[in-house]
Amino acid sequence: MVADSFYGEDEGFKRSLSEVGMSYVMALKPSHAWWHRVGEIGSPYEAAVAAGEGWEDEKHPGEWVKVARSFRDGHQQSW
């Protein structure tokens, strides 16, 4: 199941999906944050900055990085 940031922010909706065992991917707003200890990553923005690769912001994302994508049937593709 894939959903936009409206549903990604809805704890009740995510809990319901977990209760029925459904896997999901949710978008989060860039301003979204979660509880974290000092010094740990606590938002999508902080995660992007920590990933490096020249990322500054959504208008200056840095260079493309090739990744290997693994599929359920075991094959991989470079993207």
Image (spheres, rainbow, N blue to C red):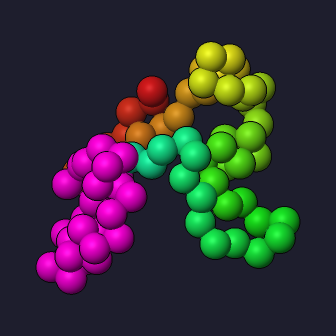
| Image x and y of residue 53, in percent | 74, 30
Residue 58 shows in the view: yes
Seen in the picture, residue 41 relative to 79 is either above or below; the reply is: below
Give the magenta part as a residue range.
Answer: 1-26
At horizontal 33% and vertical 63% (from top left) the residue drawn is 10
Q: Is residue 79 magenta?
A: no
Taking the image as shown, residue 16 lies to the left or right of residue 37, namely: left
Residue sitting nearer the eye, 10 or 62:
10
At horizontal 28% and vertical 73% (from top left) the residue drawn is 12
From this viewpoint, which residue is outermost toward the right?
Answer: 39
Q: Is residue 20 magenta?
A: yes
From this viewpoint, which residue is outermost toward the left?
Answer: 20
At horizontal 63% and vertical 54% (from top left) the residue drawn is 43
| Count of labels in the image | 0
| Image x and y of residue 77, in percent | 39, 33
Location of residue 62 (image quadrant): top right
| Image x and y of residue 39, in percent | 84, 66
Seen in the picture, residue 41 relative to 66 is either above or below; the reply is: below
Quarter of the image containing the N terminus?
bottom left
At horizontal 45% and vertical 27% (from top left) the residue drawn is 79
Taking the image as shown, residue 15 lies to the left or right of residue 59, namely: left
Taking the image as shown, residue 29 lies to the left or right of residue 37, namely: left
Location of residue 9 (image quadrant): bottom left
